Amino acid sequence: MSLASVAAPRKVLAPVRAFFRLPKALVAAVIVLFPFALMAVIPSLIAPYSPYTTVGIPLSGPSGSNWLGTDEIGRDVLSRVIFSAQSDVVISLAATAIAFIVGSLIGVFLGYRGGWVDTAGTRVVDVALAFPAIVLALFLIAIFGHGELVEIVAIAAVMMPSMARFARGTSLLLRNRAYIESSEILRASRAYVIRRHLVPNALRSLLVAASVLGASAVLISAALSYLGLGVTPPTPSWGTMLYNAFQNVFQAPIYGVAPGVCITVLAYGYMLLGRGLGELQGRTGRQERAFRTSVTRV
C-alpha cells in the first residue's frame, strides 16, 4: 500500500476532526441548525409536495403518503412545515442581525461616552424596555402593515433596546481597562477605541446575548403569525400552523406538534450557537495571550 493511498483518507477526515475539536456547544448548534438551513435554502428538494397543493382529505391523520397528515384544506403538513423555514428562519436571522449590530453599537458608544449623552440615551432605552415586546411589535405592524420586511424591522426594534442595555453594561466594565486608558493617552479617537478595543473585547459577551435575541426572535415571529399579523397566508408559517391546529385540535390532535417542535428546537439551536461562538472566541483570546506571553519571554 502506497503512502499516497494512506494519506488520502487522512486528508478527507481532517476537516471532520477539526470540526469536532470545536467547542461542544458550537458542534451541537451546527448539528441542530443544519436541518433548518437545508429547509430554508432548498425546501423544494426535501418536501414531498408543494405547500399550496391539496393532496388529500382535510385533517386526515398520518399515512404513507402524508407522514404528518393534512391540514384543514387538505395540504400536506410535512411540506408546509418544511417550507415554513423559508420565512421563519430568514425573519429570525435578519431581525437578530439588525438588533445585534445596531443595539451593540449604541450600547457600547453610550457606555464609553458617559456623561449626559449616556444618561439621556439610557433613559430612552429604559422607556423602550418598558413597553411589552409583543405590544410594541403589534403597534409597529399596525402602523406600517403586513409583510416580511415590516415584521423583520418590528422584531428588530423590539429587541434592540435589550441589546443596547446589555452592551452598555459590558462597555462600562471595559472602559477603565489599561489598554483603553493607554489609547486615550495616545489621543486615539473614540471611533478607534470602540472599533479596536471595546467591540473585540466585548464580543464574547455580546454573542451570548445575541443568541438569546435569536431565540426571542423565533418566539416573537411565531406569536405574530399566530395572531395573524405575521407572514401573509397562504405562505406557510409555523405560527399560522399552530393557530390552525388549535382551531382543529379535536379533529387533528397531532397537527400542531411538528410546528411547535420546530419553533422550540430552532430557538434552542440559536442559544447553543451563541454559547459556542462565545467559547470559541474565548479560546482564541486565550491562545493569543499565551502566544504573546511566550514571545515576550523569548
Image (cartoon, helix red, strand yellow):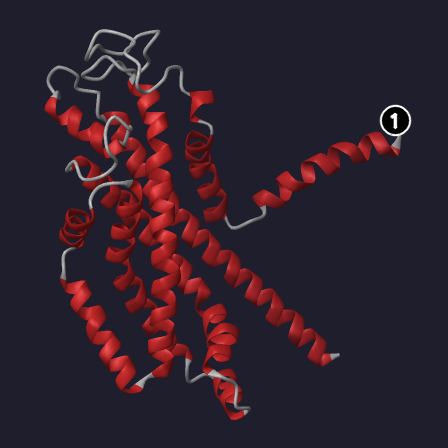
Which residue lies under the disc numbered 1? Answer: 1
Residue 285 in percent (x, y) is at 55, 66
- SS of the residue under disc 1: loop
User: Is residue 172 something one can see in this rendering?
Assistant: no
User: Is residue 275 something one can see in this rendering?
Assistant: yes
User: From the image, which quarter does the C terminus lie in?
Assistant: bottom right
Q: Determine crowd level at label 1: few under 14, some 14-19, many 20+ residues with C-alpha closer than 10 A.
A: few
Residue 184 in percent (x, y) is at 49, 89
Q: Quadrant of residue 218?
A: top left
**Residue drawn at point x = 44 percent, y = 43 percent:** 29
Q: Quadrant of residue 11?
A: top right
Q: Looking at this view, is 277 or 89 the one in front?
A: 89
**Residue drawn at point x = 51 percent, y = 50 percent:** 23
Q: Outermost residue, right direction?
A: 2
Q: Quadrant of residue 290?
A: bottom right
Residue 238 in percent (x, y) is at 26, 32
Residue 270 in percent (x, y) is at 38, 46
Query: Left or right of 126: which side holds 8?
Result: right
**Amino acid, disc 1:** Met
Query: Left or right of 92: which side holds 133?
Result: left
Query: Left or right of 7: which side holds 81?
Result: left
User: From the image, which quarter does the N terminus lie in?
Assistant: top right
Q: Looking at this view, is 215 or 244 the one in front?
A: 244
Q: Looking at this view, is 199 or 2 the one in front?
A: 199
Does 111 sit above or below residue 31? below
**Residue drawn at point x = 69 percent, y = 80 percent:** 296
